[in-house]
Image (cartoon, rainbow, N blue to C red):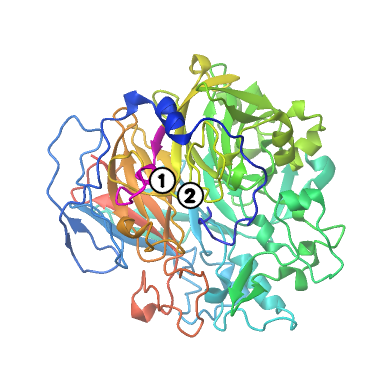
Amino acid sequence: MMSQTNSHSTRSESMAAESVKPMSEIIAAALDRRSFLQVSVTGACAAVMTSWGPGAIAAASPVDDSNDLFRFSNIPVSQSDQVVVPAGYKAEVLFRWGDPINGQHPVFKTDASNSAAEQALQGGMGHDGMEYFALPSGDANSRGILCINHEYTDQILLFSDGIEPLPPTPMPLEKIRKSQAAHGISVIEVAGDKQGRWQVLDSPYCRRITANTPMRMTGPGIILTGDSVLGTLNNCAAGRTPWGTYLTCEENFQGVFGTANESFTPNLEQERYGLTAKGYVYKIDGQEISGYRWWEADSRFDLSRPDCDADRFGYVVEIDPLRPDSKPVKRTALGRFRHENAELTLAKDGRVVVYMGDDQVNEFIYKYVSQRPYETQRTSEFGIDATGGLLDQGVLYAARFDETGRGVWLPLSDSGMTPELVAVYSRIAASRVGATPMDRPEWLAVHPQTGEVFASLTNNSKRTEVNAANPRANNIYGHILRWQEDGNDAAAIEFSWHLFLMAGNPAQAEPTRHGNVSGDSFACPDGLKFDDSGILWIQTDMSSSVMGNADFVELGNNMMLAADPASGQVRRFLTGPKGCEITGNTMTPDRKTMFINIQHPGEPADEVNDPLQPNQYSQWPDGPAGGRPRSATIVVRRSDGQTVGT
């Protein structure tokens, strides 16, 4: 995921939106009136903060309404440096950046002096999307496997001396290897006891998948990319398949590519994907300093070389958590762009459907439909290698949202591009077929009962001209769409859509910035996940550059909320520590344990930390003795052991 002004994202728009009716008219026409009760200002109930450490909770009056989909007490906004959950809940840290994946060694060194080899056996940085998988035997509710994405590295906090040495002195290979080892995925086995305390186990399933792990590539794109590559990186959100595999999504891969070749000029395809000579940059003392600089000692990240790996990143990667010796597979048929999550469901005839968003301003929402149906008897025992091409052979579509409230899935094969070009340059194909440019499409989620699809549009402060599905200019607060496929069939070509809600801040003077949230207000929706009961869990990603400023101060730190799709009611469930993003959401089958990720606690407004004062902005989760803030997976449970959310 990317913050509003986060320099992990591109700083230019890919295309202008088409101008339609005035915003007020569009919102009035597009809102699903059945989904809302009334607009209300944030319901910040009084709470008492219990200062017992990183899992501090809020105590509030219990809610007594048996008709509610969720019945926990909402909590107020927070600007504290801790995780806050409702009365009757507890939050505990499970797995941090630098924690050993076998639960034992190598231990994290608080001065960030762990070697690259040690980092390859420890949790990576930037915890993001994740999924929980039951083991073949035993109690699935007390023991399982967590697959956890690591989206990016804070190069300053990753090393004891930050990004030294600065150019023109090359980045040492050891630093590059450590950074590469901190990307990717952690696969860990976890177990909980009768008291609800969870721990990481020494397990044959545990492994790290990094930027240097051998992988296969499949699908039409391999004509251009070849069928093998080293590594996955910038792993954002995730998904899962019914045959028991994990889908991890490559997002801001453009940041680790660059070149020292002064004659390099990006071609049109590279420009569309945000590839530049400097890659991701820090702004220090008014100068742009390349943060990664991998290309200085690892030529496959050098954009000026013909064998550069740039076209081999930006895909959905399938991983088998139960087969640690299996190679991950990049599925090019699902397209190449800045993937958020991959939400998989089945069509009425059993074909596999995958919904995906491209997290950049004015990019698109996609859907993939497999050629053949999923056959349970064929895939249940053989995992990643027995899916019969379900994620390799199919049709990739992009969405057009019409002003009438109807929408169409446009096949990218109509772009006039060959299948391999569609797979590798999906953005260009989507533009050619006339898909609707969106306000940073992030997570998509399918309602478990109704089959409706929900999509978070985090923000787009650069929008000056509106369209029907993105009706707010300078959309700094974001919104959520919902749609129903025709015939309630995920493989349908047309659908009916509505605005589910417009996020905002009711304290603002300008009415268009209030939003229309019924319940607790929030901004910048990002993570979306349904649980089996139909609660839509919403996680936010306000950029550290805006948190606390005049437009956002009333909203506090990033948070997690629960929404009832039927009533439109929204209730705040969790708030995070300073400077963090709330992301990742998965549960045990009985819904009594929820795993959530806290990403980049302590990120300052300019995103530039100080290696000499690493915990000046946040000391979460370890306090002053921890040395530096660390992304982490937390466990949230009810104190009485009952179902989360009720």
**Disc 1 target residue:** 586
SS of the residue at dot 2? strand
Residue 505 drawn in magenta: yes
Q: Residue 602, how many percent across, how many down?
A: 42, 70
Q: Magenta part of the protein: which range?
A: 500-514
Tell me if residue 248 is in the magenta stretch.
no
| In the image: residue 468, left or right of residue 570 | right
Callout 1: SS? strand
Residue 202 coordinates in the image, percent (x, y):
46, 61
Image mark for residue 106: none
Which x, y percent locates residue 603? 46, 68
Most foreground residue, 542 or 25: 25
- Disc 2 designates what residue? 130
Please say if the residues under marks 2 and 1 sit with CB atoms less than 8 Å apart: yes
Q: Residue furthest top?
A: 487
User: Where does the image place residue 236, in percent across and percent down from the top left?
Assistant: 55, 52
- The answer to which quarter of the image holds residue 493 is top right
In depth, the one of 155 and 53 nearer the eye is 155
